[in-house]
Image (cartoon, rainbow, N blue to C red):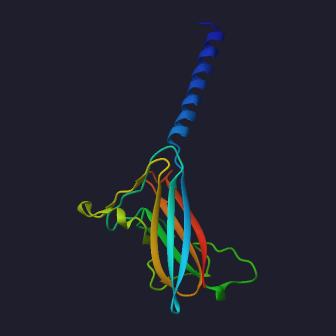
Amino acid sequence: MSVISHLFAAFSGGGLWNLYLHWRSRTFEKRLLIDVHTEITALKNKRIVSVEVALTNAGKGMLKAMSVGPGDYVYQDENERLKSSCGLQIKRIATEKLAGECQHLDWFNSPALEEVPGIPDEINLLDDYAVPSDGNKIVFWLEPGDVAHLYAPMILPVGAYLMKVSFYGTNFQEDYWSRLVCVSVD
């Protein structure tokens, strides 16, 4: 075989490999859009805060939520331990603890972010997808183009809040998305 034949074979093989990688990423690409809407309703001196989370599979492959049983975690590290594959966390912004005119509100390290009494550390947005006959494991998936609307109502006092929605799929290394939103309850 001549040198030119070897070069042609090498370039053809490399080109086919790159074409395969391009096809694979476009066919199985995973993308999740998280949209959060809140509606606030007055209830005497309290407020009902309705949080609606829309999950949209904007990718080319199916997205499946990580399924865990009671006592298991979808994620844990030195900063947090999460049990829900799609959870809502809420922290109150303590304005009295804000230093200066400008400050970054780091979800994990800001002293101005506090737990909200009476609200769980994490609200499972996929409770409706628990299968009682299988130890209440979550069975949830989105086909490409699917949209799921998840809902969490709560009563909160007047104030400012930071909310975090997280989604953990079956492959933690690739299937993790989160979104932070700020809500003012007047």
**Looking at this view, is 50 or 93 the one in front?**
50
* Picture quadrant where residue 34 is located: bottom right
**Looking at this view, is 182 or 153 the one in front?**
153
- On the picture, is 124 further left or further right than 89? left
Which residue is pictured at 76% across the width and 81% down the height? 101
Q: Confirm whether residue 150 shows in the render.
A: yes
Give the percent coordinates (x, y) of residue 44. 51, 92
70 versus 59 height, above or below: below
Number of marks in the image? Answer: 0
Which residue is pictured at 57% across the width and 87% down the height? 158
**Looking at this view, is 121 or 23 the one in front?**
23
Tell me the quarter of the image containing the N terminus.
Answer: top right
5 versus 186 height, above or below: above
Farthest-out residue, bottom: 45
Farthest-out residue, left: 133
Tell me the quarter of the image containing the C terminus.
Answer: bottom right
Give the percent coordinates (x, y) of residue 111. 61, 81
- On the picture, is 145 further left or further right than 73? right
Q: Confirm whether residue 80 shows in the render.
A: no
149 versus 96 height, above or below: above
Which residue is pictured at 40% across the width and 67% down the height? 83
Give the percent coordinates (x, y) of residue 102. 74, 78
Which residue is pictured at 56% across the width and 63% down the height? 35
Give the percent coordinates (x, y) of residue 161. 58, 79
* Picture quadrant where residue 86 is located: bottom left
- On the picture, is 85 further left or further right than 181? left
* Picture quadrant where residue 38 is located: bottom right
Farthest-out residue, top: 1
